[in-house]
Amino acid sequence: MDPFEIREEAEITAAGVRRIRSGHLWIYAGDVKREPEGAAPAIVKVIDAHRNALGYAFYSRVSQIRLRMFTRVADAPTVDLLRARVQKAIGRRAALVRPDSACRLVFGEADLLPSIVVDRYAGCLVLQTLSAGADAVKSQLVDILRDALNPAGILERNDVKTRRFEGLEELHGPLWGTIPERVEIAENEIRFLVDLSAGQKTGFFLDQRENRIAARAYAAGRGLDCFTNTGAFALHFAGRCASILAVDVSGDALGQARRNAELNGIANIEFREANAFDLLRELERAGEKYDLVCLDPPAFAKNRASLPGALAGYKEINLRAMKLLQPEGILVTSSCSFHLSEANFEEILHGAARDAHRYVQILERRGQASDHPILTGMPETHYLKCFILRVL
């Protein structure tokens, strides 16, 4: 069935109308008054109680996010519109694309392509379609990407839990072409081997790219990199630090980090498999001191219900890090939890400093890289917070 043969409608409440007009792209199930019956279409026409056309949306019958607005005009969308949106998103990143570079080419709602993610790793692409509506246009997306970029291969990384909320199975595998076991990329003259099939997210934490480059300018002396994963921050620091202890709980990730260090001829990083929470306390008890500490943990707050525990976790690791720093030391600290706002994160950092009996200066407030733009009106597109602090 052609997903662009649109015959069905969804009527939304006045609250839903206000949400769309505010610039948000999502309509939740509670604001849908009437929706299609029978076979679920990929795209529906969205109307109000007076049957005024509000636009067209990807439709997900079983998801709490029932509608994801694709257009806000009366004319029905076509595959040509999908192609134009993808091409524009790629064009916005033209300055970031080199033969060996990696970047996000499509960032879902922020590029007006709801629940669609495309990442580029050198000559290979990774595609995610994270809603039922987006999944229905997957074959069209593959054709569009092949025509636009002629990649060596396109890999599907739909092995994410969010698809379960859409009634979709988790899928993982090549969609077209050839996908090598590992792809070599370059970032700020540092080279990385990326496992596209098994790496975090789509293979690498692309959203921290600009933060790694910025933080490198502050690196010096003895460094500690917690939650190092495959070593991205640590490798950027290595050229400016005398030594670095890079820590992660995953032995597999550390194996990749060691290979990345070898690839760059870097020998001043000690990789240690450990729980960062436990190790921070052990280092404090041992009286260790560092000139630079980096904290880049996974999202502690996966949902709103987990936020109280997450707040305690963020405070704990930042408190321990501050106690380990020499006077005038640098703390690079991040949160990728959408449910933790930048203001709340700053409040946590202030509380940690108070309890550590230290003062902190904010040197830089940072966020996700520019290939992960934030769409005004959609706070969900702003998830990564990064502070570079001087601890006095």
Image (spheres, rainbow, N blue to C red):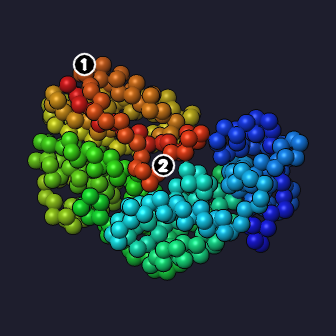
From the viewer's perspective, is 259 left or right of 32?
left
Q: Position of residue 296 (x, y in %)?
A: 34, 44
Identify the image quadrant of residue 388: top left
Nearer-N-terminus badge (1/2): 1
Q: Say which residue appears at 46% left-offset and 76% top-offset.
A: 151
Q: Say which residue appears at 20% left-offset and 41% top-offset.
A: 218
Q: Position of residue 379 (x, y in %)?
A: 55, 39
Dot 2 crowding, Cα within 10 Å, few <14, some 14–19, many 20+? some
Q: Position of residue 76 (x, y in %)?
A: 77, 61
Q: Amino acid at mark 1?
A: His
User: In the rendered image, is residue 106 in sight?
Assistant: yes
Q: Say which residue appears at 65% left-offset and 61% top-offset.
A: 134
Q: Position of residue 224 (x, y in %)?
A: 21, 43
Toward the right, the furthest residue is: 50
The mark closer to the camera, 1 or 2, is 2
From the viewer's perspective, is 93 left or right of 188?
right
Please name whichever residue, 318 or 104, is drawn nearer the observer in this view of the structure: 104
User: In the rendered image, is residue 173 in sight?
Assistant: no
Q: Amino acid at mark 2?
A: Pro
Identify the image quadrant of residue 195: bottom left
> Circle 2 is placed at which residue position?
373
Q: Secondary structure at mark 1?
A: loop
Task: Tell me: residue 65, above or below residue 42.
Answer: above
Please name whichever residue, 95 or 140, is drawn nearer the observer in this view of the structure: 95
Distance from disc 1 to disc 2, alpha carbons, whole Å, reads: 37 Å
From the viewer's perspective, is 98 left or right of 7?
left
> Circle 1 is placed at which residue position?
357
Q: Secondary structure at mark 2?
A: loop
